Amino acid sequence: MTKRSSNKNTNGATSTVSKGKIVERIAALMHDQSGVTVECNRRLPPVGGKGVKREIDVLLTANVAGYQVQMAIECKNEATAIGSPMIDAFVGKLQYVGIPPQQGIYISASGYTVGALERAKAAGMRTLTLRGLKDEHLLNSIADAFQSTIYLLLEVMNVTVTSEAPPANASDPIGLFGFYTENGKLAVLLPDLIWQMWYSGQLPDALGEHEVNLPLPSNLHQKVNGRVVETQALKATVRVIGLVVTLKGKTQEYTLVNAADEAIERVMTDVSFEAVESKLPVTAISSEDQLREYLSRPGAVQLTLDRMKLPRIVYGYLYWPPSERVMKRLKEHWHAFENGELSEPPIFTLQELEGTELRTAWDPIWEDHPAHQWMKEQTN
């Protein structure tokens, strides 16, 4: 009759079988590397080919000079130290499936008796002790872990236009911010030039304020009050803000130590993050020094995934270039003002127009805006 092992014993404690599976997973992860095939619970036939297959906890297979080499790992997480009978059993299993004992590795989370170490040494087998497994749960933590993604947002603080024309008046709302083709068609707006440089990677992306010179658009001119003017220089002050989204988790460090001489053979840090159902908080960082301080929490593991530039910039009270969604809303409010439904022109904040989620920075650009055509040309 075949016995079946349960993951729970009568008093609710995790069985040694379940504990051993935890050690198997850690051992497999520690030996997973390029050029090596790692298999858990691989069943191998006997040398003669006939008979009952025996299970190897972790099997490593690699090619050396054109020859296949296999190493077998036995994993145990017992309540007491491993004794010599368990080493004998592993030696016998290896001989049964045709793997030399010298290519066997024994990993124990509870250590070894002196007799076990002597028996393993006589067989030429490596004995390792797994440290860091404080209880039966793989995700038991020793430190906090933080996984951060940094989104870079460029905000236009001010622009300076040097030209032969006087400042634009209220009857010319575009004024010095529009650039036209020879046939008088509006080709680009001044904030478009800043956005194009940001999108193309031509502006600094370090956190903080930057003074930048903008190249004059070729074959374009400006008009003020219907008169063509010469533009001599364009400058802008911009600020790069880091919007940090952080996921919190736990980390555990595991170490494989040679049981014979206490030499450290392998170290693995296992980090886990819980699934988040609600919105993640966003932290605004204004300088590189502030970012370094934020990411330097003592006693914690920090994982910075990437610095990702948002595809829009902030100009005034909206993401630039404006999106279809925002322009529709602005038009509705402006028409309401013109029809007397509002007592004064609508005034918005960035949060009121764009909301509090970063995903609106990826909204489609308004099709009637010159930047929409420029973007199409860049993606084709």
Image (tube, rainbow, N blue to C red):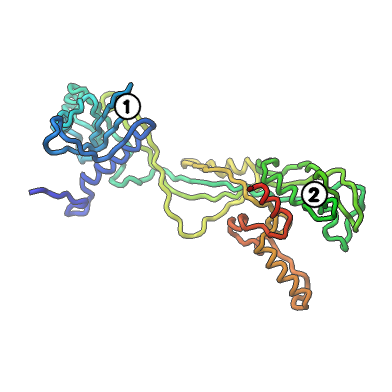
Q: Compared to 57, does 340 lie above or below?
A: below
Secondary structure of residue under mark 1: strand
Q: Residues within 10 Å of mark 2 (few under 14, many from 20)?
A: some
Q: Nearer the viewer, mark 2 or mark 1?
A: 1
Compared across the picture, whether 67 is left or right of 85 comes to right
Q: Position of residue 38 (x, y in %)?
A: 31, 36
Q: Residue at x 45, y 56 (%)?
A: 276
The residue at which mark 1 appears reads as: 63
The residue at which mark 2 appears reads as: 159
Instruction: Measure how far apart labels 2 and 1 are at the Cα level.
Output: 63 Å
Q: Compared to 94, does 13 lie above or below?
A: below
Front-most of residues 372 and 61: 372
Q: Residue at x 78, y 72 (%)?
A: 344
> Which callout, 2 or 1, points at the residue further toward the start of the chain?
1
Compared across the picture, whether 104 is left or right of 302 comes to left
Query: Please, what is the three-letter code of the amino acid marked with disc 1?
Result: Asn
Front-most of residues 266 and 162: 162
Query: Please, what is the three-letter code of the amino acid marked with disc 2?
Result: Val
State the residue lying farthest toward the left.
1
Q: Position of residue 53 (x, y in %)?
A: 16, 38
As drawn, the label of residue 259 is none
- Residue 249 makes an appearance in the image: yes
Q: Position of residue 103 (x, y in %)?
A: 24, 26
Compared across the picture, whether 229 is left or right of 356 comes to right
Callout 2–callout 1 Cβ contact below 8 Å: no
